[in-house]
Every structure is written in C-alpha cells, then in structure tokens.
Amino acid sequence: MPKIEVLGKGTFEVAEGTKLVLALEDNGVDILHRCGGNARCTTCRVEVLSGDLGPMGEAEAKLREAKGITDEKIRLSCQIRVVSDASVKPLMTVSESGMDAGPRPAE
C-alpha cells in the first residue's frame, strides 16, 4: 500500500485508488473540502513535497487555471487518487481557518 506523509501529522498507509482528501481526513488531518470534493472551491489544496500523485485531470486543471494557481506543486486533494508514496502539506485546514470542513466527498 502507498504511504502518505503529511507534514506535521505523520505517515500513514492508504489503499491504492483512495481519494487523497478522504485519506487525509480519515487519518486525522482536518483538511477543508467546502464543495464536497467536486473541484469547485480549491479549499482542499495540498503542496506536494515529494512523490508522484499522478497526472492532473481536466476538472482540476480547469479550476486551477480559473483560480490562477500556476505552481505545479499545488494540487487539489479531492481530484487525486493515491497510487504511490508521497509527502504533502495541507494548505487549508479547519483548525487554521475556523471554517466548517464542508460535506464529506464521495468515495
């Protein structure tokens, strides 16, 4: 199983194919996902510190462009299916923002 390291939170194993946003949330990371994982809000952004989180899909690419996100290390965790080891840093969390996480994204 792939391992995901989260800066400041530790490392955990994730079943291959799991959405990164769900893997983070299910392992105690208070990641935001205000739109419910539908690639509409960008609150589930993570910085990829190392590893390969796979190719960017069309929905993620379009939203990143619309929001002016140009850094290739910044990805939307709701649009990533974990397939290999990686290290990430969540950029927006419930505890830091004071916002409600949002509806749980679908599997």
Image (cartoon, rainbow, N blue to C red):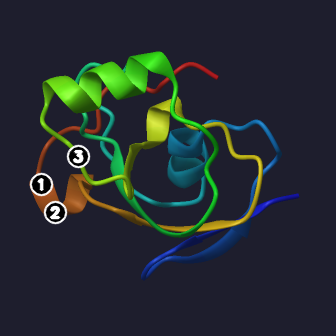
Q: Which residue is mark 1?
A: 97
Query: Is 43 in front, or is 85?
Result: 85
Q: Could you give the CA–CA distance between mark 2 and mark 3, rounded to whole angstroms?
A: 23 Å
* Residue at image point 47% right, 33% down: 78
Q: Is residue 61 left or right of residue 107?
A: left
Location of residue 2 with respect to 32 vertically, above or below:
below
Q: Could you give the CA–CA distance between mark 1 and mark 3, rounded to whole angstroms?
A: 23 Å
Q: Amino acid at mark 1?
A: Ser
* Residue at image point 45% right, 60% down: 29
Residue 19 at x, y percent in the picture: 62, 36
Residue 33 at x, y percent in the picture: 33, 34
Q: Residue furthest right?
A: 1
Q: Which residue is mark 3?
A: 70
Q: Amino acid at mark 2?
A: Glu
Q: Is residue 5 left or right of residue 70?
A: right
Q: Residues within 10 Å of mark 2 (few under 14, many from 20)?
A: few
Location of residue 2 with respect to 23 vertically, above or below:
below
